[in-house]
């Protein structure tokens, strides 16, 4: 099945569906390449598949760990059904209606996410650190009438509500569903509902979520994904690469609103009867304590997370780990080597995109090549394009193009759609090369290439070299204007606690880099900073450095 089979919708509220780009502008999406994908029925509700259908063999098994609490699959189903009834009976949610979710990673957020889909609605999950103006933009863009919010982060949503006329219903909840709080209006409404709910029968290609990009290059874009897309990520990457087992316990630093987090927190474990540890605020010590306390078998975080943990990992028992997954930002080889040297564990690098929903190129446990992003995930295809848009020979650098069972559909943004999708392929904006054995090697984001005295220099390549220095904790490299060279390479460096900034260290870092990569690539300017600008998901915001706001 491909996009030409885009079928009739069971969603009465057609706002989002009407604002999809014309199917002619979609990438080609092929659901026939794997038997799991081809078997999806025409009517499909992802929440039913992930939660209701798991009750037969997993009802009493743990689904969510939160502090000292454990929610079984049956507990989660009961909560989700009660919330679904509140949404449909009290708030008037109809199939296709958008529901904004705002919370740190906690059990009630997961229950709300399932409830929205079970009721036929569309989830619009938002990062908990977003401020009022950012929330208003999302509410207005998705025309969201209902919001469910953790009561501890109410202030910005209340301010956004005052500035928009879209929100008609707003209910607050506690992290673990405790109705004793005066502010937990959702739980009090749930008390009057029983745990049975007649799931809305949605089409496999009805919209399930609108995921907004994390804003590494400016204003976020709404990306639209169907019910079948959610299952496809689990049946490709999680099934074929991660090989998730029911005994797995996931630990995830990314928020559920980030599609990397959605996959690792919900889609992947619950497709296979596994469980997730939910932590509302992460730091390096928190991650390591969580692995030790719960016996986590898999950790999912950005490269910055591994850099932050590597010097502390010897203080904790992480022997339960079998999977270390990195995404959201290119994994520098130096970070891979530091983590492997400290733990003996390899990191599975991967590249995904909110537009494509999740990871489509990845390392696998038995085929890691440090520094390489990996090979194409089964079910997807990828190639490298030269500057003219033609297929580049293997070994040449060029723009990465990808397609598979998921792909880009921007909400109400046809011009951006035309820029992201070319000839039915998704163009991610990344420069890669593919070697003769099908391994893909990251070069840079297209806008992170630096041209200095006629040389093309990859910012991430220089970052990787700088990160190898013993004094360096984090690094970001950009090109800055220079009258003589056009641009020069500039490195923003966060030092380890034991290092002392100064001109001598600048020269030492520069000499260190010259000895490891071509000397013309070394950072002619080095600035020491206390922190680098990042999104909540750990992605470096290099555009802020280019704007002069480190």
Image (cartoon, rainbow, N blue to C red):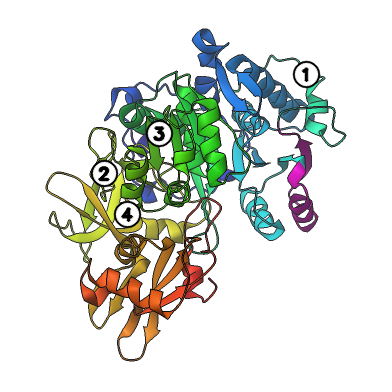
Residue 532 among magenta residues: no
Label 1–label 3 contact, CB within 8 A: no
Classify 10 Å Cα crowding around label 1: few (below 14), some (14-19), many (20 and above): some
* Disc number for residue 233: 3
Vertical position of residue 69 compared to residue 451: above or below = above
Q: Quadrant of residue 162?
A: bottom right
Sequence-earlier tag: 1 or 4: 1
**Is 128 on the left-hand or right-hand side of 319?**
right
Q: Helix or strand or loop: what does disc 3 sit on?
A: helix
Mark 4 and mark 1 in contact (Cβ < 8 Å)? Answer: no
Asked if residue 157 is among those painted magenta in the image, a careful observer would answer yes
| Residue named by callout 2 | 374
N-term-proximal mark, 4 vs 3: 3
- Residue 99: mark in rendering: none
Q: Earlier in the sequence, mark 2 or mark 1?
A: 1
Are the residues at dot 4 and dot 3 in contact (C-beta closer than 8 Å)?
no
Q: List x then y, in percent, for residue 389.
A: 23, 61
Give 209 or 130, whichever is nearer the viewer. 130
Q: CA distance from mark 1 to mark 4?
A: 54 Å
Residue 78 in percent (x, y) is at: 67, 17
Give, as a single range, the part of the protein colored magenta.
152-175
Decide if residue 336 is on the left or right side of residue 248. left
Q: Is residue 516 above or below residue 306?
A: below
Q: Which residue is mark 1?
A: 193
Q: Residue furthest top?
A: 56
Q: Secondary structure at mark 2?
A: loop
Task: Name the residue tied to disc 4.
Answer: 334
| Comparing labels 2 and 1, the label whose residue is closer to the camera | 2
């Amino acid at each position: 099945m491909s996009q030409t089979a885009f079928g009739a919708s069971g969603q009465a509220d057609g706002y989002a569906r009407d604002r999809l780009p014309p199917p002619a502008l979609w990438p080609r999406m092929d659901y026939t390449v794997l038997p799991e994908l081809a078997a999806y029925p025409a009517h499909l509700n992802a929440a039913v598949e992930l939660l209701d259908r798991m009750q037969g063999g997993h009802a009493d098994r743990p689904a969510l760990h939160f502090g000292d609490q454990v929610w079984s699959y049956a507990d989660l189903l009961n909560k989700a059904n009660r919330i679904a009834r509140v949404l449909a009976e009290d708030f008037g949610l109809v199939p296709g209606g958008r529901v904004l979710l705002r919370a740190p990673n906690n059990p009630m957020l997961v229950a709300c996410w399932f409830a929205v889909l079970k009721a036929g609605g569309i989830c619009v999950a938002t990062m908990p650190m977003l401020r009022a103006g950012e929330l208003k933009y999302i509410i207005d863009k998705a025309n969201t009438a209902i919001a469910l919010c953790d009561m501890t982060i109410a202030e910005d949503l209340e301010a956004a509500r005052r500035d928009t006329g879209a929100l008609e219903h707003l209910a607050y909840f506690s992290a673990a569903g405790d109705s004793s709080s005066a502010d937990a209006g959702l739980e009090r409404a749930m008390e009057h509902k029983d745990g049975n709910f007649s799931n809305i029968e949605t089409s496999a290609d009805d919209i399930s979520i609108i995921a907004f990009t994390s804003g590494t290059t400016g204003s976020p874009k709404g990306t639209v994904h169907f019910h079948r897309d959610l299952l496809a990520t689990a049946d490709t990457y999680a099934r074929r690469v991660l090989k998730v087992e029911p005994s797995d316990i996931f630990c995830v630093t990314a928020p559920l609103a980030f599609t990397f987090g959605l996959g690792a927190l919900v889609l992947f474990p619950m497709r296979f009867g596994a469980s997730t540890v939910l932590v509302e605020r992460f730091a390096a010590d928190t991650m390591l304590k969580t692995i030790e306390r719960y016996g986590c078998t898999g950790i999912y975080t950005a490269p910055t997370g591994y850099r932050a943990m590597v010097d502390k990992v010897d203080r904790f028992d992480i022997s339960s780990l079998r999977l270390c997954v990195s995404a959201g930002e290119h994994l520098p080889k130096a970070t891979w080597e530091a983590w492997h040297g400290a733990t003996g564990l390899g990191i599975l690098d991967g590249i995904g995109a909110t537009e494509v929903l999740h990871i489509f190129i990845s390392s696998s446990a038995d085929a890691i090549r440090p520094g390489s992003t990996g090979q194409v995930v089964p079910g997807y295809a990828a190639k490298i394009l030269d500057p003219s848009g033609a297929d580049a020979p293997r070994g040449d650098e060029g723009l990465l193009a990808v397609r598979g069972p998921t792909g880009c559909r921007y909400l109400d943004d046809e011009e951006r759609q035309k820029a992201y999708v070319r000839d039915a392929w998704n163009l991610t904006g990344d420069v890669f090369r593919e070697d003769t054995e099908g391994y893909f090697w990251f070069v840079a984001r297209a806008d992170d290439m630096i041209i200095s005295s006629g040389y093309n220099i990859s910012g991430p390549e220089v970052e990787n070299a700088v990160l190898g220095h013993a004094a360096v904790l984090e690094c970001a490299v950009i090109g800055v204007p220079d009258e003589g060279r056009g641009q020069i390479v500039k490195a923003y460096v966060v030092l380890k606690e034991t290092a002392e900034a100064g001109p001598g260290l600048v020269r030492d870092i520069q000499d260190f880099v010259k000895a490891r990569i071509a000397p013309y690539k070394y950072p002619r300017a080095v600035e020491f900073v206390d922190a680098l600008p990042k999104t909540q998901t750990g992605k470096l915001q290099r555009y802020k450095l280019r704007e002069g706001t480190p």
